[in-house]
Amino acid sequence: MRVFAVLQALRFVVLIAVLTLIAQRGGSAAQLSAALLVSELSVSFAAGVCLLPSLRLRASNLEPNWIRHHLAFGAKGLLSGVFIELNTRIDVLLIGAFSTDRDAGRYTLAAVFAEGLYQCLVVVKNQMNPVLAKLLLENQTAQIIALARRAWRYLYPGIAAVYLLGLVAFYVLTKGYLNISDPGEVIACYAILGLGVFAVAGFVPFDGVLMHSGKPEYYTLLSFLTVATNAILNVLLIPVMGVRGAALATSLTLVISILYLSAIMRWQLKFSYLTTQR
């Protein structure tokens, strides 16, 4: 997990470095995607350096049954990553479609802060994934529920504190340092988005349970339902409420996604974090 954490940090270090280089050289906006490509290639290379010494990459060690198993697992879960990434951008894309680039830019500033808050939960999720996998392998569903409930005691107060600190920092930034028209609306967007992240703080670190239980297709289903709901709510609310509608739609989607997760878990795993019965 330490190596994993270093590789995750490397992605953003390289990303910032390449973006800085492009900016200093006066590169065009079209070149910005190169930063993503270089950062992912850097992480892939570093991961390969770490993994290759422990892998036995010889033809005699390859088993067709396991190759088919891994390919099938990956194919079923492949689109989940696409939907997850799309879900973090669908509000900005739809603001651009229904409103102006100016509104999209202002909203993006709030969305970036909210995504930073959400990434705090992703850090915890990365630490919980090996624990969940082990408990699922041992069929310890009661312990999984107990673990999630214990984590709530720390996750909700912790995210609340980070959310409030972020709100203060965002207020100071927009009011004192950035020349933004109607900063109150941008601050309101972060406040709404942050409340959505707070609402799901106890569930995001444990939503990989479908993947770890060997059901990646249902994790893909969860991701699809979430992005579809987000798109529908944004289409309904942006024309009425503007950028605040986008924030409300995304925040509501986060809450609804927990209901989706619970329903799919009860359907496929016969337990959920919202109930104590199997």
Image (tube, grey):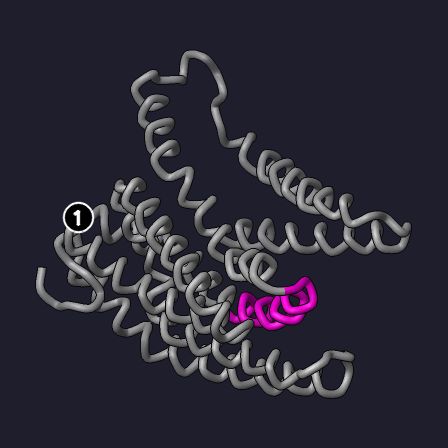
Magenta stretch bounds: 100-117
Q: What residue is at 52 percent from the left and 85 percent from the top? A: 164
Q: What residue is at 41 percent from the left and 60 percent from the top? A: 230
Image position, residue 101 (x, y; %): 68, 62
Task: Determine whether, in the image, residue 166 is placed left or right of residue 74.
Answer: right
Image position, residue 180 (x, y; %): 73, 79
- In the picture, residue 112 is in which quadrant? bottom right
Q: How many labels does the image show?
A: 1
Q: What residue is at 59 percent from the left and 49 percent from the top? A: 7
- What residue occupies the far right of the structure in this picture? 25
Q: Residues within 10 Å of mark 1 (few under 14, many from 20)?
A: few
- What residue occupies the far top of the structure in this picture? 60
- In the picture, residue 227 is in which quadrant? bottom left
Q: Does the magenta stretch include residue 104?
A: yes
Give the secondary structure at mark 1: helix
Task: Determine whether, in the image, residue 81 is placed left or right of residue 188.
Answer: left
Q: Does the magenta stretch include residue 84?
A: no
Observer-nearest of 212 and 105: 105
Question: Is 37 situated above or below 97?
Answer: above
Observer-nearest of 125 and 137: 125
Task: Determine whether, in the image, residue 23 is placed left or right of residue 156.
Answer: right
Dominant secondary structure of the magenta stretch?
helix
Q: What residue is at 28 percent from the left and 74 percent from the top? A: 150
Would you name the residue on which mark 1 appears? 268
Res 123 seen here: yes
Image position, residue 80 (x, y; %): 40, 45
- In the picture, residue 183 is in which quadrant? bottom right
Amino acid type for the residue under numbered disc 1: Gln
- What residue occupies the far left of the structure in this picture? 277
Quadrant (top left, top right, bottom left, bottom right) of the C terminus = bottom left
Res 211 seen here: no
Question: Is 213 situated above or below 247?
Answer: above
